[in-house]
Amino acid sequence: MSWTVYEPFRAPVEFPPGEIEFEACTFDDDTLLEVDRLLLAGRCEDGRLEIESGNTRLVAMIHSSAPYVAGLQEGQALRPVPLHEFVARARQLEDPVCRLVSCDKALVLLTAVHFTKRPDLGGSMKLINPAHVLRILAKEERDAAVALVHDGARTLLFLHKGRPARLFFGDPSEDPGEGSLEERLLLWAFDRVPDTRVEVFSGLNVAPDPDAGSSFVRLDDEAQPSPPATVLVSM
């Protein structure tokens, strides 16, 4: 007798939302052309391009109206993807949904950090007190990112030299709305202790992909295999 074990479906964790500039229930040549047209027109100076199917999501971070780095979400896992593979991987997804999302430049950085860095610290809020973490980061005057993961969404805090500078809620409707950035984050977090994970990242410099700045059409063209050469043989 053989047994088949099925992994439970786990949707990719959501990053804080931005403004959707374009959405399509397909990913083809026309989609690529439209995304490039919108980027060229300055509709998304900073943001991300998401291609999603099931529990898989490809994300290309957009900076200065062009791809900067890319990553892959599979369930809860995140890892980097070379930009030259991005379009080819997207074409392999079944019934994908494509979204071009504009957002704050700091949010682009914090999102990119998740795909390119490993957290210095990570664990349940039952074990890690975010207030204590913030005190240490302030004392050390470090640039850092604090991520709180709850109910399938990431709430992100950017610290500049140890001081909270930008805060992005995974679900903006849950923002307490009053107090300093630190107070708002901690008020939100301590209402959700049992089910919240804390992650801390430092060293926030994210190097551009070697193909950063290329259009998506160009990335697609360069990923396509060259046509077979025609050889003329004279007899």
Image (tube, grey):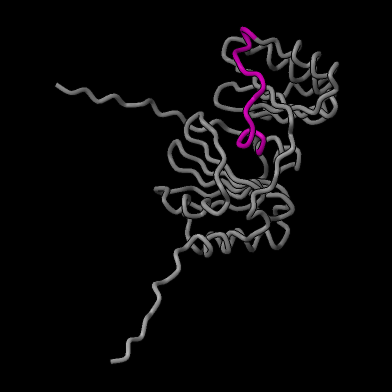
Outermost residue toward the left? 1
Q: Which of 166 and 78 lies nearest the eye of the viewer?
A: 78
Q: Is residue 116 left or right of residue 220?
A: right
**Residue at (37% x, 81% y) in the render:** 231
Residue for point 51% across, 54% down: 87
117 magenta-colored = yes
As displayed, is residue 61 above or below residue 117?
below
Q: Is residue 206 located in the magenta-colored stretch of the structure? A: no
Work out whether residue 91 or residue 136 is closer to the camera in this orientation and state it: 136
Task: Judge left or right: residue 175 versus residue 48.
Answer: right
* Outermost front residue: 235
> Whole-percent x and y of residue 125?
63, 11
User: Residue visible at 51% across and 52% down?
Assistant: 85
**Looking at the rendering, which quadrant does residue 107 occupy?**
top right
Residue 232 in the image, given as x and y percentages of width and height: 36, 86
Which image quarter is the C terminus in? Answer: bottom left
Kindly identify the residue that appears in the image at 71 percent across and 40 percent down: 206
Query: For residue 70, which quarter of the picture?
Result: top right
Counting from the top left corner in percent of width and height, residue 150 is at: 59, 21
Q: Compared to 74, does 67 lie above or below?
A: below
The mark total stands at: 0
Front one among 203 and 42: 203
Image x and y of residue 10, in percent: 45, 28
**Quadrant of the image containing the N terminus:** top left
Judge from the rendering whether residue 80 lies leftward or rightward of residue 106; answer left or right: left
What residue range appears in magenta? 112-127
Q: Residue furthest top?
A: 126
